[in-house]
């Protein structure tokens, strides 16, 4: 029999239904694998007892013929989803010992669909980063290394723990969240699939807020089909999140494997940045050729405003973060560091509880929102955001999807870029525009870099057309 941890989610689902193995056996295999791969530091909290108990419950349902869509399938969850009774830290010291008394809507949906929780995964603190190095719990490692180079690589971020776990086969699939690339970029770095749904497709309720107008839940999985299966479970409106959209949810799995013949795919010419690495250019051209070979019409399009996306994103994200993170004050939950007065207690708690990158963003965000600077920075960034969105609207009048790289670089060595925040922000150049425009996008493992590391290609679709993204994504692997 093949190793259980090597199965895709779709294969594991089929195996459970045919009773080739039990949910308890499958879960135990993943728990063993988690123990073997602990050096990756992919998990902040492991939940083995709950996993085995849930799996036993799933086995009963499987035997009774009442299995739900994700029955008995072991998943990992990024540690910024509130999980009732299970510690939830968002990778921060300030949420040390925080055990939510409620469950996020998205995680509630996967448990209601029968999935099994293996544990909560490591992440950049409050999802701020592209490497998982800003976590209070130490960096996560990518299970993959470059050829002839023993250095450990980052898994990307901020959902680096989730991507590392899926790539290491210590989870069948995982939930991440994507504000500016946090699902897609780690998927690209770890050679797995990452899907960011349309803004409003999934509920953000109980997902610890970073930048509320950009945050979106998303699956990380081994295959496009697996990501579609998970999206089926987490999509849909929620009365607890007024930004979730009442839009019908198709069966996304049906799109995996549908032909791309006759589709029009756009290649944005401005995304061919000066100095882009040869291997990334070659990957992109190869992807376009694959789609052309399958009968798609690949055309050049123009997104001129995207060149202003990075500064606009970092102004908006930091402004929203500075507001969202004001709730962490030591009064109600999480860390409290005493002081002589209430103000001093709050000051001490925030000074000790937040890491350097989070403090940098709170300070910059507060600055851009302050009187006198608001118009020059925040308002202007919102106007730029509108222009970027309009560019996409225009282009989507003539194409069905867009194709470009997920990241300009492959996974870099752990420790690098930490003292150069701007260089770290620049890595997000290809992922942030879709968050600003609220579009669905997917990263698929489509090639290998010169040093033998995975490279991802990104497929971007029209709002609420995740099905198209899934279709094109599947055609690239
Ligand atoms: N959260 C994200 O999507 C990651 C992005 N690199 C950021 O730091 O904002």
Image (cartoon, rainbow, N blue to C red):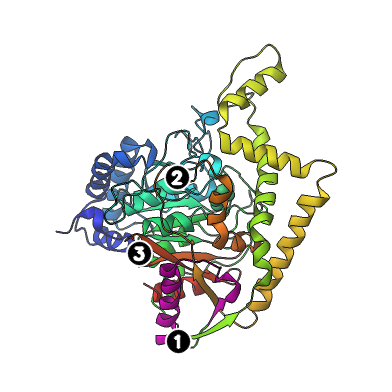
Asked if the beta carbon under badge 3 is closer than 8 A to the nearest atom of ligand 1, the reply is no
Q: Is residue 78 visible?
A: yes
Question: In screen coordinates, is 243 left or right of 52?
Answer: right
Q: Does the magenta portion include 94? A: no
Q: Earlier in the sequence, mark 2 or mark 1?
A: 1
Which of the marked residues, 1 or 3, is nearer the chain's N terminus?
1
Task: Name the chief secondary structure element in magenta.
Answer: helix
Callout 1 crowding tier (Cα within 10 Å): few <14, some 14–19, many ≥20: some
Question: Tag 3 or tag 2, which sits nearer the N-term?
Answer: 2
On the rendered structure, is 372 left or right of 248? right
- Residue at 41% in and 39% down: 139
Quadrant of the rendered structure where residue 325 is? top right
The residue that label 1 is drawn on is 261
Q: Secondary structure at mark 2?
A: loop
State the residue at coordinates (55%, 24%): 335
Q: Which residues are magenta?
A: 265-294
Numbered disc 3: secondary structure: loop
| Foreground pick, 96 / 232 | 96
Q: Which mark is residue 32?
A: none
Of the 4 image quadrants, the one containing the N terminus is bottom left
Residue highlighted by disc 3: 450
Outermost residue toward the right in this view:
372
Q: Position of residue 295 (x, y in %)?
A: 44, 88
Q: CA distance from mark 1 to mark 3?
A: 31 Å
Q: Which of label 2 and label 1 is nearer to you? A: 2
Residue occupied by mark 2: 416
Spot occupied by residue 418 in the image (x, y as percentages of width and height)? 50, 42
State yes or no: discs 2 and 1 in contact (Cβ < 8 Å). Answer: no
How many marks overall? 3
C-alpha gap between disc 2 and disc 3: 19 Å
Residue that protrudes farthest toward the top in the picture: 340
């Amino acid at each position: 029999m093949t190793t259980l941890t090597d199965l895709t989610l779709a294969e594991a689902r089929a195996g459970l239904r045919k009773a080739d193995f039990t949910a308890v056996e499958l879960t135990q295999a993943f728990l063993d694998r988690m123990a073997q791969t602990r050096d990756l530091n992919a998990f902040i909290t492991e939940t083995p007892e709950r996993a085995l108990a849930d799996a036993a419950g799933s086995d009963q349902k499987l035997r009774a013929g009442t299995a739900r869509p994700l029955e008995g399938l072991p998943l990992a969850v990024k540690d910024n989803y509130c999980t009732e009774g299970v510690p939830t830290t968002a990778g921060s010291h300030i949420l040390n010992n925080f055990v939510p008394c409620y469950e996020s809507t998205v995680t509630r949906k996967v448990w209601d669909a029968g999935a099994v929780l293996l544990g909560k995964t490591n992440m950049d603190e409050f999802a701020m980063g592209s490497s998982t190095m800003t976590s209070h719990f130490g960096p996560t490692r990518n299970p993959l290394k470059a050829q002839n180079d023993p250095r450990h690589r980052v898994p990307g971020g901020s959902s680096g723990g989730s991507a590392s776990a899926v790539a290491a086969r210590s989870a069948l699939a995982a939930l991440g969240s994507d504000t500016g690339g946090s699902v897609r970029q780690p998927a690209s770095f770890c050679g797995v699939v990452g899907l960011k749904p349309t803004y409003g497709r999934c509920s953000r309720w109980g997902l610890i807020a970073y930048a509320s107008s950009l945050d979106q839940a998303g699956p990380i999985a081994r295959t496009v089909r697996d990501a579609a299966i998970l999206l089926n479970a987490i999509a849909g409106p929620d009365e607890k999140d007024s930004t979730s959209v009442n839009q019908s949810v198709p069966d996304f799995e049906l799109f995996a494997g549908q032909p791309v013949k006759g589709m029009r795919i756009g290649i944005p010419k401005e995304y061919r940045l000066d100095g882009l690495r040869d291997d990334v250019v070659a990957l992109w051209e190869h992807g376009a050729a694959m789609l052309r070979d399958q009968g798609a019409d690949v055309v050049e399009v123009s997104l001129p405003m995207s060149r202003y996306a990075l500064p606009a994103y970092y102004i908006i994200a930091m402004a929203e973060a500075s507001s969202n993170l004001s709730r962490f004050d030591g009064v109600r939950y999480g860390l409290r560091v005493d002081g002589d007065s209430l103000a001093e207690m709050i000051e001490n708690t925030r000074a000790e509880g937040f890491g350097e990158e989070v403090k940098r963003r709170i300070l910059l965000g507060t600055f851009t929102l302050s009187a006198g600077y608001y118009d020059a920075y925040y308002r202007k960034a919102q106007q730029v955001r509108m222009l970027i969105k309009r560019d996409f609207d225009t282009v989507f009048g003539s194409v069905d999807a867009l194709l470009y790289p997920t990241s300009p670089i492959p996974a870099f060595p752990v420790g690098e870029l930490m003292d150069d925040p701007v260089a770290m922000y620049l890595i997000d150049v290809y992922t942030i525009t879709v968050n600003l425009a609220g579009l669905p996008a997917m990263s698929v493992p489509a090639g290998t870099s010169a040093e033998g590391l995975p490279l991802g290609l990104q497929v971007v679709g029209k709002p609420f057309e995740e099905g198209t993204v899934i279709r094109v994504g599947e055609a690239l692997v």
